[in-house]
Structures are given as C-alpha cells and as structure tokens.
Image: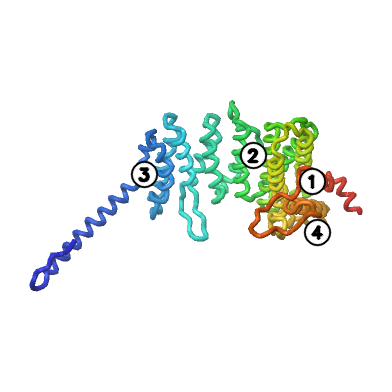
Amino acid sequence: MRVPVRSKGVMPFRPYFLGIIAFAIVFFAGAIFVSAQTTTDFAPWKDAKNIDAIPDWARVMLPRDFRGVTGTAREELLAKTLSALVDIVSDSEVVPATRYNAILAAGQLETMPGSPGSPPTAYPAALTYLVDLYQRADTPHYLQYGALLGIVRHAIMGLDSDQRDKVIELFLATVTSEFAPGHALPLEPEVWDWFRHTALDGLSALKTTGTDGKVVEELLLLINDQSQELEEWSRTYQAVLNREAWQRIRRTLELASKAVKTLGDLDYASVPNVDAGIMTDTFIRLTKAACEVKSRIIVDAIEQKEVTPNPAALREQIVVNLKTCVQSVVWGIKSGFLTARPRENSFYASLQNDEPAIKRLDVLMSEIAVLSTFFDEGVRERRSGALPGVAKAFKFDLAELRDALKKCSESLPDNQEKSRILDAE
C-alpha cells in the first residue's frame, strides 16, 4: 500500500511508527492464524467422496503440519495425529483405501525430522500401535500389510532396544510361515509372499544375526526348506510344463534367493557361533537345486514341443530367475558382488584362515562365475565382443543352457563328506 505524503514538509514520526506496529500485529496474528489452519483436519478423510484426494493429503500432512514444531508441542501434535489416524483405521465404515493410507501415514510419523547425514527418528508410539495391529487376528490383510510397511520403516531408521527383539520375532514369524499367523482364512500364497519378502527387508535393515544367531538359524532353515521343495520338483516334475508349476517354482526360488541375500546383509563381525559348515552346505544346496530344477524344466520343454511356451521367453525367464539366485548366493557369502572383495563384516571375512569351508566357498563362487559368464557371453567357442549401440542378445539356445546348468550342478560338492575328499586332494 502506498503511503500518502504531504506535498510539503515531513510526515510526523509518531503516527507512522504506530502504523508499523499496527501492521506487525495484524501480520503476526495472521501468520498464527494461517499456521493453525494448516494443521490437518482429519474429518474429511472419512468422506468417501474424498477417496482420490487422500493419498495427496497423506503425503503433505507430515512436512506441512510438523514443519518447525519441536519439543512438547511436537509431542502433543504427534499424539493427536496418531489418535486421529487410529480412529480412521479402526472405523469399518471408512473405505478400505482411506484406511490403508491412514495406516501408512501412521508409519511415517517422526519424533525428529532428518538432517543431512542423519536419518529421521521414528515415533515410538506409532511402532507400538503398528506391531499390535499387525498381530491381531481380526486385522484385515490390507491393513496388516500397511502396518508391516510401517514397521519395516522403523527398522530402517533404528529401533529402541526394548522393541528390537519383539520386531525381530515378528519378522521371523512372517518369513518362516506359509500363511498369515493367527488368521482363520489364509491369504493366497502369492500375496503372502509379499509379506515374507517385506519382512526380509526388515531383517536386512536391522543387520543383526539375532540373539545366539537366531536370525541366521531361521533363515538357513527357510532356505533349506525351499531347496528341498525345488529338489522334489526336480525328481517328480510332470512331463507337461504348465503355468501353475512354473509359477510355484519361480516363487520358491525367489523367496530362497531373497533369504540368502538377507544373510549377506547381516553383520558377522562379532558373531562367534555361526556354523560355517552348515552355512556353506546351504549355499551349495540352493545353487545346485536351482540349476537342477531349471535344467529339468528345459528337458521337459524340449521333449514336449507341442505344449512348450515360446522358447525365447522361457529361456529369458530361466536366466533372469537364476541370475538373481546365484548373485544372491554370492552376496550371502561376501556381502558384495562377485567381482568385489568381501566386506569386512561379511560371513566370508569372519572365517578363520584354516576354516575348511573356505575352499568349498571358493569352488562355489568359481562355478557361479563360470555360469554368470555363460549367461552374459554364451558358449565359449562363439563368444565375441558386443557391438556399440546394439542390444545384448542371448548367445545360446535352450539345449546349451541346459548343459551349462547341468555342468554347474555336477561341479559342486553335495555335502561336507565330499568336502573332506576335496581337502584331501
């Protein structure tokens, strides 16, 4: 606003000063009013007509409502916000999508925002609520999964010691069970796999091997169970390749691969009681089982030409599945990629120089390197450099892929009895 001036002389100072004060009072009062207005009103969240707007509301709620709010005021606002979100989640009259977004928002609440080089601090009361909701038998599965995502986020940002063991048990119970614990009607296996993979993400984030190595022990049992299932498929696989069988084998191998990769995310620097022999047996068994079951699929595909899906598509699916598996096995050993040095906190680095398992692990990684090179470059006699700007193509057919998988499987020792023969040579 333009301040009028007299045509002659100077405007008296006192009225001008009072005008500044009046303007400041109005400005700061307005700022306070605007700030109060930006605190989320959760009542509209329950209105079904707002369903499309809820994700955006949830996304902006945390940075807008909590910006600059600290101390007691932040604690009070956190408690108020969590209470409002709990109310929405527990209201069965609210549409499921909104309830799901509310549970996700609860998992985003932070006691302290992050800063460069420092992650945010998650709100502990929200974790208590999420764990309780996840473990209730009457919680709808979509809310249970939303709660699990929030729990994993807390694990990534760091857990208080009094919550750590409880969350580890929750993750392990999810990972090692076929269906949702406590539910009368289980989920479809494909859907429950989402839960199991997400829980493995949580264990990776925590990095601990658990009390007395329990996390390692449970994951090894899981991997061996999946390997046994793959071995049974190899022995009893029906002549006709069907979609259901392929999907089951793929899911089994993906879960085992994720579990063995999770082993590589753990910290072995101060863990004296991990059985290196059992760990090594498990890595070898999974690699052999994966190669054998995929080789058997190829055999059946070749023999049953009239029912075989597109050979190129089948070849691609097998290679992608196996690449993920063998790279995960290497990560489980070294906590790194095939060509990298083992990380200082890895399982491999924790072994003593005279540990018999080292030689077997070296053989395993050597065979994986040969197989990985085959995946990328094909049969040795026909290898050539890739042309710039030309998309990479598979340089082998199904029969050659079958032979490479069979060779890898046969090159690996079955168990520690064979390793003693290897050591004696």
Q: Nearer the viewer, mark 2 or mark 1?
A: 1
Which disc number belongs to residue 400?
Answer: 1
Which disc number belongs to residue 175?
Answer: 2
Q: Earlier in the sequence, mark 2 or mark 1?
A: 2
Q: Nearer the viewer, mark 4 or mark 3?
A: 3
What's the amino acid at mark 1? Glu
Which disc number belongs to residue 27?
Answer: none
Q: Nearer the viewer, mark 4 or mark 2?
A: 2
What's the amino acid at mark 4? Asn
Does 255 appear above or below 187?
Answer: below
User: Dot 2, crowdedness within 10 Å: few (<14), some or many (≥20)?
Assistant: many
Label pair 2/3, CB-CB below 8 angstroms: no
Q: Nearer the viewer, residue 75 or 185?
A: 185
What whole-number distance in Å separates the C-alpha atoms at marks 2 and 1? 36 Å
Furthest residue to the bottom? Answer: 9
Q: Secondary structure at mark 2?
A: helix
Residue 418: x and y, percent? 87, 46
Q: Earlier in the sequence, mark 2 or mark 3?
A: 3
Q: Earlier in the sequence, mark 4 or mark 1?
A: 4
Q: Quadrant of the C terminus?
A: bottom right
What whole-number distance in Å separates the C-alpha atoms at marks 4 and 2? 33 Å
Which disc number belongs to residue 40?
Answer: 3
Name the residue that disc number 4 marks: 353
Q: Earlier in the sequence, mark 4 or mark 3?
A: 3
Furthest residue to the right? Answer: 425
Q: Secondary structure at mark 1?
A: helix
What whole-number distance in Å separates the C-alpha atoms at marks 2 and 3? 36 Å
User: Dot 1, crowdedness within 10 Å: few (<14), some or many (≥20)?
Assistant: some
Residue 217 visible in the snapshot: no
Q: Secondary structure at mark 3?
A: loop
Residue 203: x and y, percent? 62, 46
What whole-number distance in Å separates the C-alpha atoms at marks 4 and 1? 38 Å
